[in-house]
Amino acid sequence: MVELPPLTPQILLGLTAIVLFGIDIIAPDTRKNGLLASVSAIGTVAAAATAVWFLAAGSGDYRFVQFDGALVVDALSLFFAFVVASVATLVVIGSYDYIEGEEHVSEYYSLVLLAATGMSLMAAANSLVTVFVALELASLPSYALVSFLKTDRGSVEAGLKYFLIGALSSAVMVYGISLVYATTGTLLLDDIAAEVAGNQFGGVLGLGILMLAGGFAFKTASVPFHFWAPEAYEGAPAPISAFLSSASKAAGFAVAFRVFTTAFPLDAVAAVAIDWSLLFAVLAVVTMTLGNFAAATQNEVKRMLAYSSIGHAGYVLMGLAALQSGAAEANAFVLGASMTHLLVYGFMNTGAFLFVALVEYWDVGRTFEDYNGLATRAPVACVAMTVFMFSLAGLPVGGGFLSKYLLFAGTVQAGFAWLAAIAAINSALSLYYYSRVVKAIWIEDPSDDLSLAGTPTGLYTAVVAAAVATVVLLVAFDPVAQTAVHAADVLFAL
Amino acid sequence: MVGAFDFTPAIPLLPFAAFLVAMLVGHFAPRLLPKGGAIPGILATAGSLLLSIWTFLTVSGGSYHAQDIYTWVVGQNTFSLHFGILVDPLSAMMLVIVSLVAVLVHVFSLGYMNDEGETGLPRYYAGLGLFTFSMLAFVVADNLLMAFMFFELVGLCSYLLIGFHFREPGPPSAAKKAFLVTRFGDYFFLIGVVGILATFGTARFVAVGDGVHSFPHLAEQALAAAGGEGTMPEHVAHFLDVIGMNAETWFAILGLLVLGGVVGKSAQFPLHTWLPDAMEGPTPVSALIHAATMVAAGVYLVARMYGFYALLPTVLAIIALVGGFTALFAASMGVVKDELKQVLAYSTISQYGYMMLGLGTGGYIAATFHLMTHAFFKALLFLGAGSVIIAMHHNEDMWDMGGLREKMPVTYYTFLSGSLALAGIVPFSGFWSKDEILYEALIYGAGDSPILLAAYAMGLLAVFFTGFYTFRMVFLTFHGEPRSDTARDPHGVRWNVKLPLVVLGILAATVGLVNMTPVAELTGLHIEYLHQWLVIPEASDFAALGYDNYHHLLEQFAGYHAADIGPLAPGAVSLALALGGAGLAWVLYNVDSPTEHTEKLGGVKTVLYNNYYQDEYQVWLAQGVTLPLARAADTFDQGIVDGVVNGVSSVSLFAGSRVKRIQDGLVTHYAALLTLGLVVLLVAFGLLEGWF
């Protein structure tokens, strides 16, 4: 019997991207949006299913080292491969309607798939080189995707800004990598860990680590590397915003989790170079506070979601901030909670952006006022949106309640009650702006000329599927959380 | 074998079914409902009565019953909350009283409501059914929390029924008043229930079975331990440590808190003001709720947990004094009332005062006895009044009546039977029970507890007033010449009014014979059946609920000792006073054309007419004290609490708009800020970690 290679999910994603190119080469001039969307969806679903299958079969209990340690497959990489692939599935299904009628459709799908490949590789990267390459593989298609609507000024502007900030951040990160290499003489994460303890160039190493963290902060849209996010999310096609704010963020966290826990063991690094859990605590507080406060004053729903996405990055950062040396169990718990939140967030946030995509498809408008009374015209989608909003706020209608609860509880358990308290205050504030959307769509009266053109099947399917997944995660939360905590366990069991 | 106890849960549930039928069928298919719901109600309460009698007979055979029905909160490492049934002599007796009066009131309602062409009958009978259910469930409750829940439900039904004629101005107002005033007392009761659960970890009245405790028994152990015998139960000791009080003080506080509910429900001073107003409700409701049963709930509750109160001499003294004072106070107000039902209302307050006096002075049997006799004769009097009101076309003013004796003999003679019982004339039932209460107060007062003598004195004085207002009422209503056209030609009443009157009339006359203490003393015969009924053999699991145990507790903990006084002389004194009052009424009012004599009272008259300004001062309390306090709290809430909340939100929004301004759209600014932020982090961590 042939064994599948451990990197099957990533390979599937990459192959699908190539197949999409192939289709375009064979039939460049025919309209084939449906075919391309189907192929992409099959590819992403297959990748997600493989990841789940591997996890269920217990492959995640071991570390399958690939390419001499450049990549590694374990529970963490499979978990995030699933998150990325499932978000990508929702995104390509939603995109079917959204980019219908645009030029270069096949490039769109293959770029999405390539970005997804890069993101899932980020979760498997085990050397600073592959970290960087995977990160760029995820970033470069993203830049192109953000400016996909070439005739739309906003989209092009957003893509350019994203690219410039991204280039700057990449530069910072590469510099950080070079400093780490200079002090430790290796790029493999496991070997770096061996060199860190008692390192005589503590200052330089600390500098490198901090700059490396900057690169991850860019990918996860954390302060102060967040500036691109509101602009890019707002300008990009809404499905791409969904993709970036969910999958890309998750991948950024995946690689950060692995690099910091594997290469820079906290007790050794804190002694010589930098207490990075403190660094992440600072970033977490600033990020969640800035994200939520800014979200509260936005007038446009999509921009509000962009800031709320920053806020959620702040919550997830608590998973790194609350780590402490020598408390393996508490560490695994809180890190697992972070991962769980990312998974749940993947569904509810993607769903929310896809709802925005749906509204953009209808050409209704972007502000809260424009959303007034939508429920009278599209009740099903509005129920889904309500689930997303309340779940994001942490009310018990979706998995967001439990994952947030788990995250806060883990943080408190790890002895960071003050951090959890700040997060709770932020979370309370977030209820304000999330419920503004709910109020607009359900309570306010629609304007007289509100009429919605058509019911796009793909978008509806994606939105409803995301809503169902969000609600199901409330009920079937336990296996997910256990898988996540187990993945964190495997990570710490080195 | 299937015994009566298997059917005990059905006793309350049957009226509940009647309630559902009356409500649902009455709402969806009113045509299908016979007599507007009266028939299902009568059938259900009759079924309850039969089952109650069966239960009663089983209990007389010496078997008692306690059972958990349903645990609705299962405590992990703490107490659980459950519904359960407790059938002992006290509750068995009460079951029979309540279901009997309920049946008779349902029958009477046929005449009072259906025959008078009232509308909204399904609502009326649904209310009666729900009330009967709640009261019966309250009676069989085996723990204080369940008792509280049904106590509240009873209060709700009272509200619904008083406000039955909700389109008129009076009834809704009276209903609200009744609800609010009793709620005020129940508030303390609720705190008491929580306190008892917290202190003892259980609210059961009796412990039957392994690993089960009852709070009166735990309290007894705790107090004994405080006095140097035995050990303090762990849970109680721990709780007392937490609150830092000794057992005696804390238990007295708990007892008084629960007593708050009792004072409200049983219309004791100072929470009695709702009851006279409650007469706005239909008269059968007054009979069922505001005389025989609901008002009895308070007194019954004290009797139910007498094992707890018997430990607390201070609380007992307060109960006795409140009771004695209420008895006298209410009786004095009844003297000047012009309306038939008002007189009865004040007499009800007064009579419940006697029961409290009895309980407070250690006369557990006497109070229970009076609870029973009063239920019958007061229901009779109210139903008789209802009959008169039907006859008088709903005019209740006694000065418009007179001479009804010839026109409605059945009503007259039954009413007279009830009045003789109320006034306490031998051998009618009220004499025996009231006399026993006063006797117990006297002997324990003359024993070691002189404060009880004050309560006794008030109770004794009230006997005179009782005799007077009772016969004033009888003479004004039935004797003399008719003073109005309606009185000359009253409306006739049918069998459905007369039947309940006759049944109750016979009972009012005879039920006192079950416990003729003076006769027993005199003749040496063992005819104190009620006494024997309430004694539970020591071997039984239920001995803690028996009179012997209570007596023992009273002697050991409350320091009550009986002085050696025979029952005859005190009985003669109270009989003489009652006859004196009745005689005065005879002289003043048993004439062809009686006139008002209230002018002779001078200034007292105004005070009495205004009910000692009780309403006024309570309204003042509400308007002059509570309202400003509420306003101050509101100001605090609006200004400070809301101010903080609003302040936080405006600060958040302001900060948010600042953040928004940083995001100005210029990518060069972003790059600069990003770099700046990185540098700040580098410098800060560099300094912190000592890189430089």
Image (spheres, helix red, strand yellow):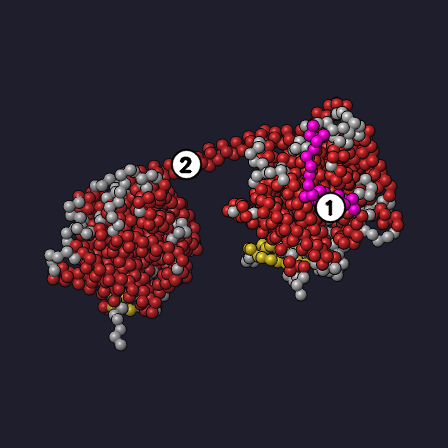
Q: Residue at x 56, y 49 (%)?
A: B21
- Residue B373 visible at all: no
Disc 2 crowd, CA 10 A, few/some/many (<14, 14-19, 20+): few
Q: Same chain, marks 2 and 1?
A: yes
Horizontal side of B364 relative to B521 (left or right) equals left
Q: Is residue B490 magenta?
A: yes
> Which of the marked residues, 2 or 1, is nearer the chain's N terminus?
1
Quadrant in the rendering for residue B537: bottom right
Q: Is residue A45 above or below residue B376?
A: below
Mark 2 and mark 1 residues within 8 Å of each other at the beta carbon: no
- Residue A150 visible at all: yes
Give the image location of residue A376, x and y in percent: 33, 44
**Which circle marks residue B646 in the picture?**
2
Quadrant in the rendering for residue B158: top right
Give the image location of residue B652, x and y in percent: 36, 39
Give the image location of residue A399, x and y in percent: 38, 54
Q: Which residues fall within the magenta stretch?
A: B485-510
Q: Residue at x 27, y 62 (%)?
A: A45
Instruction: State the quadrant of the N terminus of chain A.
Output: bottom left
Q: Residue at x 20, y 62 (%)?
A: A16
Q: Secondary structure at mark 2?
A: helix
Q: Is residue A1 magenta?
A: no
The chain carrying label 1 is: B
**Which circle marks residue B503 in the picture?**
1
Give the image location of residue A23, x and y in percent: 15, 61
Q: Secondary structure at mark 1?
A: helix
Q: Amino acid at mark 2?
A: Asn
